[in-house]
Amino acid sequence: KGVHCIVDRGKKRKASDARLLSGAESDAFRLLWMWAMLVMIDDSKRTNFVVLDEPDSHMDPTTTALMKERFIPALQSLVDHVILITPLETGQYSDAKRLTVVKHKGKSSLEEVVR
């Protein structure tokens, strides 16, 4: 009858179906699922880059900090290049190289933002 995923929320809270996760929980679950799949791929066959498009858009500051401090380094241990797309100017990812898309005469290019 298919695959069922139940989320154990701990602390005596009732477990729930993964389809009922909040936006931030769903985003975190998808990121962890990607990481779990990458772990199972042989190094010689694994991609050398991953693009994360606004993975923190629904996350609170604590969850975003955990993603930066724990998840991104774990992902970088598997994949050489992690490209994070974000509209945020918070400095949350201040140690990362910053690029911006510049469009001129109908052509887009990437330019490094010098800080």
Image: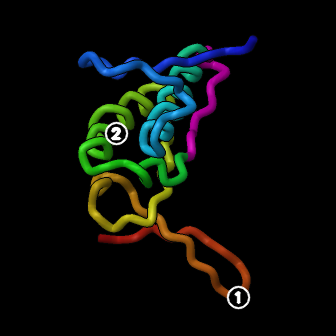
- Identity of the residue drawn at 47% across and 45% down: 23
- Per the rendering, the mark at residue 105 is 1
Quadrant for residue 114, please give it. Answer: bottom left
Residues marked 1 and 2 touching at CB (< 8 Å)? no
- Per the rendering, the mark at residue 67 is 2
Amino acid on which the number 1 mark rests in the picture: Lys
- Identity of the residue drawn at 30% across and 32% down: 70
Quadrant for residue 94, please give it. Answer: bottom left
Does the magenta portion include 39? no
Where residue 86 sits in the image (x, y, percent)?
Answer: 45, 60
Quadrant of the snapshot with the N terminus:
top right
- Horizontal side of 59 relative to 27 (left or right) equals left
* Whole-number angstrom distance, CA of label 1 to CA of label 2: 37 Å
Observer-nearest residue: 44 or 52? Answer: 52
Q: Is residue 33 above or below residue 66?
A: above
Q: Which residue, as the protein is rendered here, is positioned at the far bottom?
A: 105
Asked which secondary structure carries label 2, the reply is helix
Residue numbers of the magenta segment: 41-51
Does the magenta portion include 44? yes
Quadrant for residue 110, please give it. Answer: bottom right
Q: Is residue 44 above or below residue 47?
A: above
- Identity of the residue drawn at 44% across and 54% down: 57
Where residue 7 sits in the image (x, y, percent)?
Answer: 45, 21
- Identity of the residue drawn at 57% across and 23% down: 38
Amino acid on which the number 2 mark rests in the picture: Met
- Per the rendering, the mark at residue 10 is none
Observer-nearest residue: 16 or 72? Answer: 16
Quadrant of the snapshot with the C terminus:
bottom left
